[in-house]
Image (cartoon, helix red, strand yellow):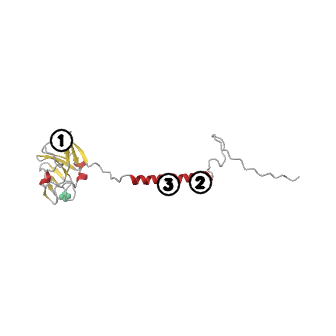
Amino acid sequence: MPEQRTKPSPPPATVCPAAEGKEKHPSCGKLDRRTFCAALGWGGVAGLLGGTLYVSGRFLSPAVLYEPPAFFRAGRLEQYPPGTVSERWKEGERVWIVHTDAGLYSLVATCTHLGCTPNWSPAEKVFKCPCHGSVFTLEGDVVAGPAPEPLYRTPIRLTPEGELIVGTGRLGIRLASQANREPKRSAPGYVIST
Ligand code: FES
């Protein structure tokens, strides 16, 4: 009797033990080819979608340059008695707040020659630049040295609550060269009558 040949049956599917501690088949935990290709495809789609959303968001968002505030709160008017030059904001905001018979105004603490920082001389009541000797009056006018222009002024105003709002020297540095221009010296927004 001829030997009956039987068709070899496929190997049984590997069952990966779920419980910990059991020995795993070497193929457990590995991706088969189909799963790998599917994961690759979905990953590509997700990446493409994310990239498109990012580029669209950048395109639609406004191109705004965020700057520090152009004004700062300088306290109350009473903190600046008549006949004084306040150096309180010289380092941080680069302005002096001056209170004279002409009113209250702020001068930018930057020499108009080459940008050094002048010093306030209370004895002489002038601002003196240590670099090349320019001298400025209380109003900011040049009385000596090579400075080509008076000290700049920044906008200043008083709120209804009595708080002083002053333009910053950093941004307002070129806003107003007014000291030698009499009609502008008392321009609204640059001096507070007291
Ligand atoms: S920078 Fe002030 S005098 Fe030159």
Q: Amino acid at mark 1?
A: Leu
Q: Is residue 131 left or right of residue 40?
A: left
Q: Residues within 10 Å of mark 1 (few under 14, many from 20)?
A: some
Give me the disc on residue 77. 1
Q: Looking at the rendering, which quadrant does residue 128 occupy?
A: bottom left
Q: CA distance from mark 1 to mark 2?
A: 73 Å
Q: Which residue is mark 2?
A: 37
* Residue 35: % across, % down: 60, 51
* Residue 148: % across, % down: 16, 60
Give the residue displayed 18% in from the left and 41% down from the top. Answer: 77
Q: In front of the other: label 3 or label 1?
A: 3
* Residue 44: % across, % down: 53, 54
- The quarter in which the C terminus is drawn is top left
Q: Is residue 39 left or right of residue 172?
A: right
* Residue 156: % across, % down: 20, 47
Q: Regarding mark 1 in the picture, which secondary structure is present there? A: helix
Which badge, 2 or 3, is on the more N-terminal residue? 2
Q: CA distance from mark 2 to mark 3?
A: 17 Å
Residue situated in front as seen by the camera: 93 or 6: 6
Q: Residues within 10 Å of mark 3 (few under 14, many from 20)?
A: few
Give the residue displayed 47% in from the left and 52% down from the top. Answer: 50
Q: Is residue 38 visible?
A: yes
Q: CA distance from mark 3 to mark 1?
A: 59 Å
Residue situated in front as seen by the camera: 100 or 122: 100
Give the residue displayed 55% in from the left and 52% down from the top. Answer: 42
Q: Which residue is mark 3?
A: 48
Q: Amino acid at mark 2?
A: Cys
Which badge, 1 or 2, is on the more N-terminal residue? 2
Residue situated in front as seen by the camera: 152 or 54: 54
Q: Amino acid at mark 3?
A: Leu
Q: Are marks 3 and 1 in contact (CB under 8 Å)?
A: no
